[in-house]
């Protein structure tokens, strides 16, 4: 049994379509402080956008092996 389930956490899966990526692209690039050539940051951008749209104020996430 997953720890999140044991603790009563709710999991939300987000499926990103190619169309959503294209529509978000200009906003994503504009939000960057420094230009980067790696679209991997889009996942964090999209997650933050989805969290905001669902009305959440706080979200704990981890990215990388040290989280």
Image (cartoon, rainbow, N blue to C red):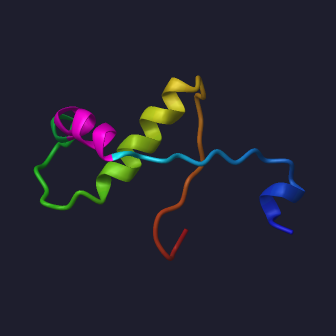
The kind of secondary structure the magenta stretch mainly shows is helix
Q: Nearer the viewer, residue 12 or 4?
A: 12
> Which residue is situated farthest in the bottom direction here?
65
Tell me the residue at 58%/28% (across/down): 57
* Quarter of the figure with residue 54: top right
Quarter of the figure with the C terminus? bottom right
Q: Position of residue 15 (x, y in %)?
A: 49, 47
Check the image and report above or below for 26 versus 4. above
Which span of residues is magenta-colored? 18-28
The reply, left or right, for residue 19 in relation to residue 64 is left
Q: Position of residue 47 (x, y in %)?
A: 46, 43
The reply, left or right, for residue 32 in relation to residue 48 is left
Check the image and report above or below for 62 versus 16. below
Q: Position of residue 1 (x, y in %)?
A: 86, 69
Does residue 7 belong to the magenta stretch?
A: no
Tell me the residue at 43%/33% (across/down): 49
Check the image and report above or below for 43 versus 67. above
Q: How many marks?
A: 0
* Quarter of the figure with residue 3: bottom right
The reply, left or right, for residue 9 in relation to residue 45 is right
Check the image and report above or below for 1 versus 29. below
Q: Position of residue 52 (x, y in %)?
A: 50, 28
Tell me the residue at 36%/43% (across/down): 45
The reply, left or right, for residue 6 in relation to residue 27 is right
Tell me the residue at 49%/34% (across/down): 50
Q: Nearer the viewer, residue 25 or 36?
A: 25
């Amino acid at each position: 049994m997953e720890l999140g389930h044991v603790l009563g956490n709710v999991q939300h899966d987000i499926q990103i379509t190619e169309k959503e990526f294209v529509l978000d692209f200009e906003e994503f690039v504009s939000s960057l402080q420094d230009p980067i050539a790696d679209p991997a940051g889009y996942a964090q951008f999209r997650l933050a956008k989805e969290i905001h749209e669902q009305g959440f104020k706080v979200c704990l996430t981890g990215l990388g092996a040290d989280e």
